[in-house]
Image (tube, rainbow, N blue to C red):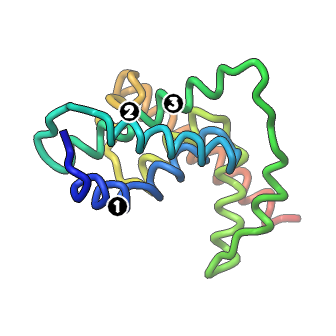
Amino acid sequence: MLDTGQFDILAAKYMDTIYRLAFSWLKSPADADDVTQEVLLRLYRTDREFENEEHVRNWLMKVTVNECRKIWRRPFRTHENIEDYVETLVFEDSNYRDLFEAVLHLDKVKRLTVVLYYIEGYSLKEIAEILGIPAATAGTRLSRARKELARYLKEEDSK
């Protein structure tokens, strides 16, 4: 079981990562906040012995994915207009905004794969383990996502 100091360090380190993953799946700041809070509560309450930092990180990502699945399946789940949220974000470069919007236009499974691979730095094997899918499927999703992103960004440039 983690002591308060260990939990504080891990929570501070992974809170943003959990939120990004949840937001990329759910496209809702409120739902992403709920998932982040639930995942951190589960971390605080767990009596699991972690082998190392990577073990903690992978466990957190799996718990985050599972919590997102629970919320996604809710029959009363509301969908917010993501365009309103995007307008509140500040980007260092306008190209980052375009890329962010392009990623949000991907379907859920491709978007999640892109976020885990490019933003969180997971390998395809690790993504497959987190999502409970074969590594080849993770690779296919990433490849298709890249093609869709390229096509979307090309269309946006030609407008």
Q: Front-most of 137 and 19?
A: 19
Instruction: Identify which residue is drawn at 41% across, 40% down.
Output: 41
Real-space Cα distance between discs 2 and 1?
Answer: 16 Å
Q: Is residue 131 above or below residue 121?
A: above
Q: Amino acid at mark 2?
A: Lys
> What SS does tag 2 mark?
helix
**The N terminus is located in which quarter?**
top left
Residue designated by label 1: 13
Q: Nearer the viewer, mark 3 or mark 2?
A: 3
Residue 92 % position (x, y): 61, 81
Q: Residues within 10 Å of mark 3 (few under 14, many from 20)?
A: some
In the image, taking residue 83 as reference, residue 120 lies left or right, namely left
Instruction: Identify which residue is drawn at 38% across, 33% down.
Output: 62
Q: Residues within 10 Å of mark 2 (few under 14, many from 20)?
A: some
> Residue at the bottom extreme?
92
Real-space Cα distance between discs 3 and 1?
Answer: 19 Å
In the image, taking residue 12 as reference, residue 88 lies left or right, namely right
Residue designated by label 3: 67
> Residue at the left extreme?
51
> Residue at the right extreme?
159
Q: Front-most of 115 and 43?
A: 43
Residue 91 % position (x, y): 65, 76
Which is more N-terminal, label 1 or label 3? 1
Q: Front-most of 23 and 128?
A: 23
**The C terminus is located in which quarter?**
bottom right
Tell me whether the residue at label 3 lies in contact with that at label 1, contact meaning CB atoms closer than 8 angstroms.
no
Residue designated by label 2: 62
Q: Residues within 10 Å of mark 1 (few under 14, many from 20)?
A: few
> What SS does tag 1 mark?
helix
